[in-house]
Amino acid sequence: MENRVIADMLEEIADMLSIDETPTTRFEVRAYKNAALTLLSIQEPVESVYKRGGIKAIMEFPGIGPGIAGKIEEYIKTGRMKKYDELKRKYPIDFKGLLLLEGMGAKKAITLYKKLGIRDLSDLKKAVESHKVSTIEGFGSRSEEMFSKSMQLQESSRGRILLGVALPAAESIVHDLMDSGTVTKVVIAGSTRRMKETVGDLDILAISKTPEKAMDVFTSMNDVTGIVSKGPTRSTVSLNIGVTCDLRVLPPESFGAAQQYFIGNKQHNIDTRKIAIRKGYKLNEYGLFSKSGKIIASEDEHDIYAKLGMQYVPPEMREARGEIKLALEHKIPTLIDMKDLKGDLHTHTKETDGVNTIDEMADAARSIGLSYIATTNHTKSLKVAKGMDDRQFAVFMKKVDKLNDSLDGRFRVLKGAECDILKDGSLDLSRQTIESMECVVGSVHASFRMPEKEMTDRVIKAIGSGLINILGHPTGRLINEREGFAIDLDRVAQACEDNDVALEINSWPNRLDLNDTNIMLASKYKVRFSINSDSHSTAHYQMLRYGVGTARRGWLTPERVLNAMPLKELEKSLKR
DNA sequence: GCCGTTTTCGGCCCGACTGTTTTCAGTCG
């Protein structure tokens, strides 16, 4: 059972309690919401926490006390939660679906249910189409329009877009604004800035002497499909990629505070504000203020953290996963950065399903500042990708030798393969072929649907073979397309530690596998990680930044990253 | 309902915008 299930129930309890608001329920509502947030942020299923340490162990988590822990226990034991059921009988509403809509909160949802019997999105759609919603007190034609627009947007985008779509889009907006000369400073904020794997909307912050003109540029960009709202300080547009984008124009003196505030995430901000309060300050999006209202810091984010006695927190870490404590202790690690990458250990060529020659791949890698790559074509069982057999690899490796000779030490191509880990855990090439290679990625590409134990045993057998250097895309998930396969990552990471095998962070925006939380989980073991592009063309190297972003979200330092090593050191490390 | 470097009672993050009002509730980030 996923923690999300229980978190959703707690969230709904909060929604339903919020309707009969009294001074006491107001904070009860907040307590349930906080507990839901906590559940979403913990990696271990709360069910196994409970099995291990009972109700006491659940109460260890912040925001979960005896009341809510008791309800979680009840749900784990009986599959029901009395309080939830009682409230739900009173309000049989699909809060989760309805509250995704712009301008819809719990109170409006309940009003719509009481007056019109609306329980879910399809009810609401009918009511909006027949203009019944605007007959209700407190709702007007604008509300109707907004709900209608929001439902359409949701249908077309189904929520969130990939970072690989969001970041280039945000960068292009930044570029357009700078180019127009209407802004003097502009930055990306929000989950895009935190390099979250999916993004629900874009946030851009700017300083402008001519806000109206900046907003004109913003709302008339090519990619804009509609204007949701437009004002001098804030405008929102819909983009053709299926999400909305906010532009906020800010006074220069509060640009730092605004960044701190709009980069988020929400819980990180709340925690930071609490630190401010403890110090007798007040923190908001305009600055850090003393009790008397004197500005302590505001122009520069770094100053704000410093004045709070904290180390600067890189945006990718701002997820309320313990970074606040580290910042207070001045123990924020120096995270891996793009410039730390010396090479790329997972690339393909036209011999299999790539589009470029090995010469072109090497050349492109060198031109972005890398000093080596491993060429890792697919193996024979992956027929769709024209996987190669032992004989074909022998021929190809001669070509690589020749290329390396001609490069004369200016760049190095390591011979390798992305070798399929077959159903029984054996490898898709002969031992002899693999032993003649320098860097081998082992990957699961078929028979995904195995029970967890079987899959874990399969992968661990490959790790223990002493023949692979890197476990490729370890969970096999495809964001918004396919769940990862069932695998016990603790056991896999332990096996990697024992056999000196690195775990891949695959940089494809629809993979990002391992993801941030799995990186944190695996980091408990003495394993290295390899941030690879899995390039199938020279253009794909640019995806490395998504892998690096994900590694930073997982708090990785360069020392833990295999391909942050200089070539000499790497070669030693790859010896099997 | 949760929580404790002013604590086991009395607080709980905060400001702005929107639509619908005529002074504000609800929603959002």
Image (cartoon, coloured by chain):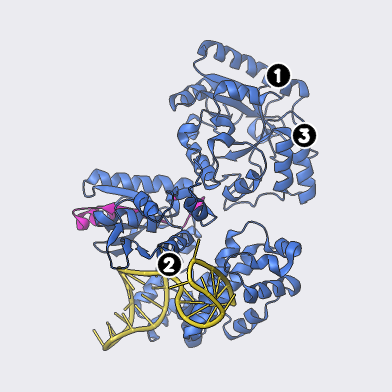
Alpha carbon separation for disc pair 1 and 3: 18 Å
Instruction: Give me the chain letter of mark 1.
Output: A
Quarter of the figure that contains the C terminus of chain A: top right
Q: Residue at x 41, y 44 (%)?
A: A168
State the yellow chain.
Answer: B
Q: Is residue A122 visible?
A: no
In contact (CB < 8 Å): disc 2 and disc 3: no
Instruction: Give me the chain letter of mark 3.
Output: A
Q: Nearer the viewer, residue A247 or A576?
A: A576
Of badges 2 and 3, the one in the foreground is 3
Badge 1 crowding class, 10 Å Cα cut-off, few under 14, some 14 to 19, many 20 or more, is: few
**What residue does disc 1 label?**
A436
Q: Position of residue A165 (x, y in %)?
A: 45, 47
Per the image, label 3 sits on a secondary structure element best described as loop
Per the rendering, the colour in which chain A appears is blue
**What residue does disc 3 label?**
A464
Q: Earlier in the sequence, mark 2 or mark 1?
A: 2
In the image: residue A158, left or right of residue A309: right
Which labelled disc corresponds to residue A150? 2
Per the image, label 1 sits on a secondary structure element best described as loop
Alpha carbon separation for disc pair 2 and 1: 58 Å
Of badges 2 and 1, the one in the foreground is 1
Q: Are marks 2 and 1 on the same chain?
A: yes
Q: Residue at x 67, y 75 (%)?
A: A71
The three-letter code of the residue at mark 3 reads: Gly
The boundaries of the magenta stretch are: A194-218
Q: Residue at x 54, y 43 (%)?
A: A551
Indicate whether A97 appears above or below A546: below
